[in-house]
Image: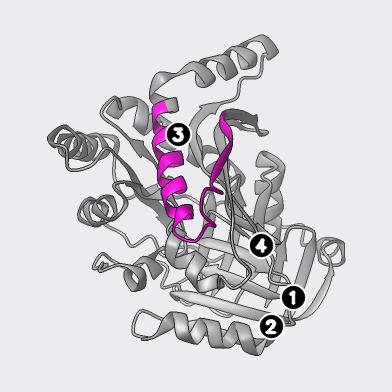
Amino acid sequence: MRTIIGENYYDGIKAELILTHKDENVFIRLEDFLIKYKHETKLFFISYDLKNKIENLSSNNKDQTQFPLLHCIVPNKILPKEEFENSNPTKNSTFNFKPEFNKQEYIAKIKKIKHHIQQGDIYETNFCYSWSTNQKLENSFLLYQRLKALTQAPFSVYAELKDHIILSVSPERFIKKRGNQLISEPIKGTAKRKNDKAADQAQIKLLASDPKERAENIMIVDLVRNDLSKVAIKNSVSVKELCKIYSFKNIHQMISKVTCTVSEDVSFSAILKALFPMGSMTGVPKIRSMKLMETYEETQRGLYSGSIGVMQPNGDFDLNVVIRTIIYNKSKESLSFSVGGAITIDSSPEKEYQETLTKAEALLKACQ
């Protein structure tokens, strides 16, 4: 196991917990593991389908990546990431990804989803689809470096695990705990950057004032506020930033920040049960949206829409949202990634399709 998260490089496995779809009592087993290694640093790799252990949900779509439900690792060594980054290969390969839906198929699905919104079944949902290729990945770290250079994403992860390699350039934080504070930063709203400075500033203003994008973001903020209230000390949930535009190297994103205070005895599992999966990857109402997307999506999301992060020995943790992420299955020699977006009553199927291409652009470019 070799992993880079944040400023650290984690090497080797001192202890690990791997939970699959077949396992029962997953949160009891998780808490027992966290208590046993309370004074150690822990790494988390959490599949979106952990939702099935939180709510009465199931996933019967094809499992493309075959990632476990939850993988928690106590690393052997923690070193500055430069110790790993300084020894990288120079060879690169070209990968030719193909989407599971063409444009017409995608638009047809969006129209059906919008019909559910018109009927009042849901208000907003996140619909995703995958891209894949069956090719051997020989120089994974070089590909990760290319992704990082193209995006400069703040919550990036590189991980060489037993059965998978993960190359993530996520711009989104799921949940962070510092002391008794929880911080969630949902993203809803995306615009491609322009090369011309004036045009790029115009893109920022356009995104900031777009009523559809703001409506998407605000609905998810309300969902996050509700989720946080399940574990928060009374009256402590607060929106610190609403629909603020953050600029990354390749895109602009609309991000909000919601916080709360929790008591010292709230467990990691309790927080996970209250908040997971994150609202930005589900919809409103949350459970109904997740159920509907299982019928319209054709591939299990696996680690995509899940979370990766680190828990410190003092119990503080920081977890990302697994988006803009390529996952390599070593035994199948297959690479895949997924993209998606929020669908509301005001969504234009054509524009939603173009937004998924914007999100896929850096991943595809890095693989050329």
Quadrant where the image shows the C terminus: top right
* Badge 1 element: loop
Q: Secondary structure at mark 3?
A: helix
Label 3 sits on residue: 217
Q: To which residue does mark 1 refer?
A: 313
Q: Residues within 10 Å of mark 1 (few under 14, many from 20)?
A: some
The residue at which mark 4 appears reads as 158
Residues rendered magenta in the picture:
215-243
Q: Quick check: 335 left or right of 100?
A: right
Mark closest to the chain's N terminus, 4 or 2: 2
Image depth: mark 4 or mark 3 in front: 3
CA gap, disc 2 and disc 1 = 6 Å
Q: Is residue 2 above or below residue 33?
A: above
- Rate crowding at label 2 as few (under 14), some (14 to 19) or many (20 or more) other CA atoms within 10 Å: some
Marks 3 and 1, Cα distance to the nearest angstrom? 34 Å
From the top left corner, tell me how far across and down residue 359 is, in percent.
Answer: 49, 38
**Quarter in which the N terminus is drawn:** bottom right
Would you name the residue on which mark 2 appears? 38
Q: Nearer the viewer, residue 145 or 305?
A: 305
Name which of mark 3 and mark 2 comes first in the sequence.
Answer: 2
Which mark sits nearer the N-terminus, 3 or 1?
3
Answer whether labels 2 and 1 touch (C-beta < 8 Å): yes
Q: Quadrant of residue 108?
A: top left
Q: Can you give x and y, in whole percent of width and height, for residue 242 in the image?
A: 55, 31
